[in-house]
Image (cartoon, grey):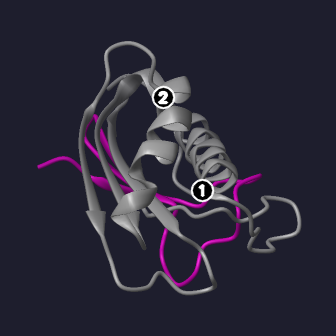
């Protein structure tokens, strides 16, 4: 069985009582990200396009800190407080995944807390020879 590595990524928004990501073998499971400012830690408010962009930028930071990248994402789960926000979210989403789009689910939830309208988690693959170490 592959060993489990837990990552806290410098430069990403501070996580709660969980890791930014967990790697097992060549699979990387990212915790949900929201539109938090990676420097101040403040939850940023704005329309769904703004929140989607900041959330996906945070995911990119975590992926790269764990030896992966957006192109290696296999599965995305998008949580929206209003499924009617999906078209506007999709406009920004396709900027981050223009080719080889990952599998995805988008679901409506009652509340995400902190006044955010979107949270995204992903599963990605990393090079099995990558030497990135667990923090």
Is 128 above or below relative to 133? above
Q: Is residue 14 magenta?
A: yes
Q: In the image, 42: left or right of 113?
A: right
Is 19 above or below relative to 28? below
Q: Residues within 10 Å of mark 1 (few under 14, many from 20)?
A: many
Residue 70 shows which numbered tag? 2
Q: Residue at x 26, y 63 (%)?
A: 107
x and y percentages locating residue 89 in the rendered image: 49, 46
Residue located farthest toward the left when viewing the structure as drawn: 1
Q: Residue at x 11, y 49 (%)?
A: 1
Considering depth in this image, is 66 or 92 the residue closer to the camera?
92
Q: In the image, 8: left or right of 80?
A: right
Q: Is residue 81 magenta?
A: no
Considering depth in this image, is 16 or 22 the residue closer to the camera?
16
x and y percentages locating residue 97 in the rendered image: 45, 25
* Quadrant placement of the C terminus: bottom right
Is 33 above or below relative to 86? below
The quarter holding residue 102 reads top left
Is 33 above or below relative to 105? below
Query: Which is more N-terminal, label 1 or label 2?
Result: 1
Considering depth in this image, is 103 or 115 the residue closer to the camera?
115
Q: In the image, 94: left or right of 102?
A: right
Q: CA distance from mark 2 to mark 1?
A: 20 Å
| Residue range (magenta) | 1-30
Considering depth in this image, is 68 or 78 the residue closer to the camera?
78
x and y percentages locating residue 117 in the rendered image: 53, 70
Residue at the spot of label 1: 48
Confirm whether residue 69 shows in the render: no
Q: Residue at x 58, y 50 (%)?
A: 52
């Amino acid at each position: 069985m592959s060993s489990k590595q837990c990552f806290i990524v410098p430069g990403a928004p501070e996580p709660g009582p969980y890791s930014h990501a967990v790697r097992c073998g060549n699979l990387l499971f990212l915790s949900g990200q929201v539109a938090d400012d990676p420097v101040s830690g403040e939850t940023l408010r704005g329309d769904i396009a703004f929140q989607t962009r900041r959330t996906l930028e945070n995911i990119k930071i975590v992926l790269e800190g764990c030896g992966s990248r957006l192109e290696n994402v296999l599965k995305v789960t998008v949580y929206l407080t209003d499924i009617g926000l999906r078209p506007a979210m999709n406009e920004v989403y396709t900027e981050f995944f223009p080719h080889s789009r990952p599998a995805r689910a988008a679901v409506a939830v009652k509340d995400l807390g902190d006044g955010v309208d979107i949270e995204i988690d992903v599963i990605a693959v990393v090079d099995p020879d990558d030497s990135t170490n667990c923090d």
